[in-house]
Amino acid sequence: MKRINFTSIICFFGGLMIFVLTLSFAVSFSLCLPLHAEEGMLPLSEIHKLDLKTKGLKIDPAQVYNPNGISLIDGIINLSGCTASFVSGEGLILTNYHCAFRAIQSLTTKDDDYMQAGFLAKERGGEMPAKSYRVRITESYRDVSTQVLSVVKKKMDYAERTKAIEKKIKEIELKAEKQNPGKRARVAEMFVGKSYVLFISTDIKDVRLVFAPPRSIGEYGGEIDNWMWPRHTGDFAFMRAYVAPDGAMAGYSPENVPYRPRKHLKIAPQGVKAEDFVFILGYPGRTRRHSTSHFVSFEEEVRLPYVVDLYGKLISVLEEMSEQDRAAAIKLAPRTGGFWNRKKRYSGQLQGLKKVKLVDKKRAEEKAMQDFIDRDKKNKKKYGNLLESFANFYAEKRATAEYELTLDYLFQSYPLRSAYTVYEASIERKKKDTDRLSAYMERNFSRTKERLEMRMSNYFEPYEKVALKEMLLRAARLKGDKKIAVVENIIKGKTGTGVEKAIDAFIEASYKKTKLKDPAFVMGLFGKNPAELKSLEDPFLEFAAALSPDIVAHDKNKKRRKGISAGLLSRLVDIKKQFLGKDFLPDANSTLRLTYGRVRGYSPKDAVYSLPFTTIKGIVEKHTGQEPFDAPLKLMDLHRAKDFGQFKHPELDDVPVAMLYNLDTVGGNSGSPVLNAFGELVGLNFDRVYEATINDYAWNESYSRSIGVDVRFILWFTQKFAGADHLLKEMNIF
């Protein structure tokens, strides 16, 4: 399939709209063509509309994105949800330590503690499989909006509309994969209910760990420094993509050979300095900048507080158990790190939303929009009740939020998650392929089982019991007609301490009897029908079967709401275009985007200015010898000797560790290469400052700063600390 110009996909959008907060925190929507250099996540083919050379780009924009040839984007990949890039012609990949962490953790044992000591393969044969990792390389894309929306009929209810669209998307993906053997297809919704794009990609299944620093570098500062500046975290790792000798995308085999990418990025060991032009190519996740005040207030008052509270409670348990047992700490590390990251991010979003009073600003904008609608008879007839409909929609969500959030987060226990996956598969696998839930389609089923088995490898029973108890207690506290029947059956009308005792008794009996602790046993259950599963008399399988009506009804309601939301948001796009007098960019949706700006510090509060670079000196100053500030002694010795090699910043007289820039990034941009004006890699994006956690909802140049590992630290540490000269030679550093 030929790669086409993205303009044809969003031609009716014309220009771009970027939602920002002004320096006084007033909300404004500004036309992005021409736009300020620092704003926005642009579809790649929009580059030709921007005079990037006047902003600082020193190469032809066609070298960044060329729909008919090779360009920088051919070296950018999606690595299991993160962004990464090829940095050699032999499939060498540079990404974040936290993006490679699951691989590092899964390979770690008490005898080979790669989390503490780090990992280095001194030769190709020593590179170790990163189980469940995938490399996705975007090959082409085209607009399929007409095809997708052709199934929508006027008399459909909202649930039917959503179901029909989802089925059509599956059919398009299956057809595309049949027409493109060995490729992967994905349809992405660009504007909700309006536009859809089919992406074709190459998916590489054999990914291996090459080099990772010790955790005391890869996560230096831990959760204390997470989402903070100044930052001194060496959040980087190297991996490699492998394919079969004939070039086929094969699973792991010792016979596989390194993948040869069409394009790999050149490293600029000299780095950058303050105010230099930089840009990022990557796969930013979901943003919600075009949402209404009703959505933001729901997030601020309902969803975010629920999740912050839940993760806070689970984190305290995880940390206590990890401190007592190193083996437990290894198994629990992915959950501990993941929960901490989300909790701090959501806490920052709560604080940020309140600080900038985003709900109030959106309400003011919506009042002005309503006035605009009411002044025109046609608009009033078509859109007069639109904003009121959003209010009613979120009022309904609030009424059942506690019940729905509890169902959404119920599966904290791996045996229960495994039981429900197996039970759901026994029902879904009987259906026609395109009628199944996506996880159980032929194209996805092996991946579903692989992920489940990977999770189960981290089973730690003491934590499983506590996590399950927390969720059952939350379910038991539900009020009104929204209760979970299987939980009500456990507590049997008990109150007070009787509820907790009943839950404790259920958990102890269930864990004692179940066989779903064994990954091999669980994998052997796939293929059995519901009657066969019932005959096993396993308590978790019985729980899953009894829970199923609640989950099925919840999922059906989600589809109904998705249909309602799609209709409302589609109309909102149309009237907002009139109201603003300009078109705007769709929210980020994990598809390739470009953002650009400057290496630049910021002022987080009155009388404080943060410089845009940190150095190894800062690591030494923070060092206490205790986690999370336990820098390796060898690093301290190298710094004391000023053994900086060619990687010293001339003005700082030290090796830079991290840097700040005003580019517009969100989750999914982790691992994105930071590129200089010549398209050379100068850093690796890994985080944002605390004030920028609200980038999902709003962006502002005054406080939205992203954080990257400086390439000079990556190269210095790889050479001087790890002695991995062979990697620097492979990247043509010397």
Image (cartoon, helix red, strand yellow):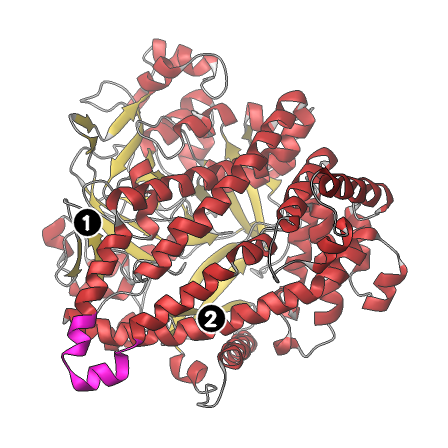
Determine the image quadrant of residue 588.
bottom left
Residue beneath disc 1: 38
The structure residue drawn at horizontal position 28% and vertical position 38%, both measured from the top left corner, is 268
Placement of 691 over or under 259, stated as above or below: above
Count of marks placed on residues: 2
Mark nearer the N terminus (2 vs 1): 1
Q: Position of residue 578 (x, y in %)?
A: 18, 75
Residue 223: give its label.
Answer: none
Secondary structure character of the magenta stretch overall: helix
Give, as a single range, the part of the protein colored magenta.
Answer: 370-385
Residue 562: give its label.
Answer: 2
Placement of 617 over or under 589, stated as above or below: above
Per the image, is 377 magenta? yes
Instruction: Look at the image and tell me in which quarter the N terminus lies.
Output: bottom left
The structure residue drawn at horizontal position 68% and vertical position 43%, both measured from the top left corner, is 468
**555 left or right, relative to 139:** right
Q: Look at the numbered disc 1 and give the secondary structure of its residue.
A: loop
